[in-house]
Amino acid sequence: MMGRCRVPQLLVLLTFVFSGDRTEAQRAGCKSVHYDLIFLLDASSSVGKEDFEKVRQWVSNLVETFEIGPDKTRVGVVRYSDHPTMEFDLGKYKTREEIKEAARKIQYYGGNTNTGDALRYITTYSFSKKAGGRLSDRTVKKVAILLTDGRSQDFVLDPATAAHQAGIRIFAVGVGEALKEELDEIASEPKSAHVFHVSDYNAIDKIRGKLRRRLCESK
């Protein structure tokens, strides 16, 4: 009887240990690549409060796999609908736990989907020195991860091109009815490595591993 009781306990213990080892291995893979990393999150009415909670958790989960610190990877979050808003900038939080806690509190307002305006905002402000960007350090990569679930209500090609020319590497993650053509306009080259699409918000965490691997590859 005691032997049968110990097996589930052992399985739980092994699951915990290997899960911890996997997270540490993921972080190790990103140690040589440090980012100024901006999450650009669609917070328009089409998302809804319930699904936006999944977005918050997704951001928190992705942050878990990076080496976070003032001299390592810095993370900022911009949410957008009618207008872009800096939820927190690159210079605000210094530890992984601080960022994860802030991610869980990202506000949701609803409204329209002005993705082009949001792209202009990150290009002109989010990576600036004022916002905590490290423009003088060429070893630090500028990366934006955009998550959206619908068609933009303004044009995205020109502001996306300006972002690319400013040295910002953009990953475009589309959910549900997000347009493949629009994601291609937003994302960096090669499109096959920078465009993701999932059926709904329940599936966004399934691409976390693949997205993290692409992020941790030097470009």
Image: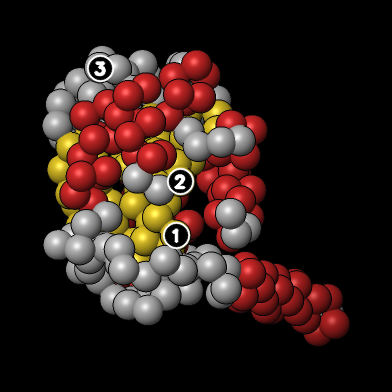
Of tags 1 and 3, which is closer to the observer? 1
Image-based side of 120 in relation to 207, left or right: left
Compute the Cα span from label 2 to label 1: 8 Å
Q: Give me the residue at 53% from left, 68% from top.
A: 33
Marks 1 and 2: in contact by CB < 8 Å? yes
Mark 2 or 3: the one toward you: 2
Total numbered labels placed on residues in the image: 3
Q: Quadrant of the N terminus?
A: bottom right
Visible residue check, residue 67: yes
The percent position of residue 30, horizontal first and vertical second, equals: 57, 68
Within-10-Å neighbours for mark 3: few <14, some 14–19, many 20+: few
20 shown above or below 199: below
Query: Between disc 1 and disc 3, whose residue precedes?
Result: 1
Q: Which mark is residue 154?
A: 3
Residue 196 appears in the rendering: no
Picture layout, residue 126 above or below residue 82: below
Q: Regarding mark 2 in the picture, which secondary structure is present there?
A: strand
**Structural distance between the alpha carbons of marks 1 and 3:** 28 Å
Q: CA distance from mark 2 to mark 3?
A: 21 Å
Amino acid at pointer 3: Asp
**Of the residues under marks 2 and 3, which one precedes in the sequence?**
3
Determine whether the residue tagged by mark 1 lies in a helix, strand or loop.
strand
Horizontal relation, residue 60 to residue 77: left or right: right
Query: In this figure, which colouring scheme has been used for the structure?
Result: secondary structure
For the point 30% across and 63% down, the residue is: 135
Amino acid type indicated by mark 2: Arg
Residue closest to the eye, 132 or 46: 132
Circle 1: is it few (<14), some (14-19), or many (20+) Cα within 10 Å? many
Residue 169 bears which disc, if any?
A: 2
N-terminal label among 2 and 1: 1
Q: Position of residue 219 (x, y in %)?
A: 58, 54
Please give the residue where the numbered disc 1 appears in the rendered image. Answer: 141
